[in-house]
Amino acid sequence: MNSSMATSACGHKTKELMQVVRQQNHFLNVVSHELRTPLNNSLEMLNQLSATQLDEDQAELFQDLDKANIDVTLVRKNADGLRR
């Protein structure tokens, strides 16, 4: 393989890799956006619920939901971090 062919092949592979990176970034943008809206709604509902008097069972469910929201928030933040 001569130098010109090697350079051409390298350029082609670079373009392919750049396309893959763009596709991954697009996917992560979509996932992050799709998680953000329902997560914000859920966090606001939990915030309002926390201002009310809860019985023991309700308080336990509240804690479970709060933990789940924290977990989803971390997943979204990790997805955001992968885009950079």
Image (tube, helix red, strand yellow):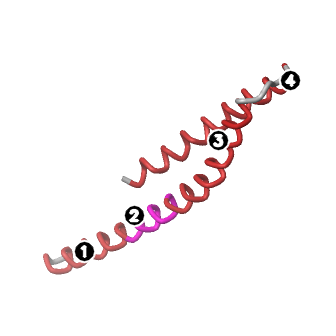
- Name the residue that disc number 4 marks: 57
Examine the structure image and report whether residue 25 is included in the region drawn in magenta: yes
Using the image, tell me which numbered label, if any, was put on residue 23. Answer: none
Question: As shown in the figure, which amino acid type bears the numbered disc 4?
Answer: Asp
The quarter of the displayed image where residue 68 is located: top right
Label 3 with label 2: CB-CB less than 8 Å: no
Q: Earlier in the sequence, mark 1 or mark 4?
A: 1
**Where is residue 75 drawn, in percent x and y?**
55, 43
The residue positioned 86% from the left and 23% from the top of the image is 57
- Name the residue that disc number 1 marks: 11
The quarter of the displayed image where residue 63 is located: top right
C-alpha gap between disc 1 and disc 3: 47 Å
Magenta span main SS: helix
Question: As shown in the figure, which amino acid type bears the numbered disc 1?
Answer: Gly
The residue positioned 42% from the left and 47% from the top of the image is 81
Q: Viewer-proximal residue, 44 or 35?
A: 44
- Name the residue that disc number 3 marks: 43
Question: As shown in the figure, which amino acid type bears the numbered disc 3?
Answer: Leu
Q: Is residue 25 above or below residue 1?
A: above
C-alpha gap between disc 2 and disc 1: 15 Å
Q: Is residue 69 left or right of residue 26?
A: right
Q: Earlier in the sequence, mark 2 or mark 1?
A: 1
- Name the residue that disc number 2 marks: 21
Q: Which residues are magenta?
A: 19-28
Mark 4 or 2, which is nearer the eye? 4
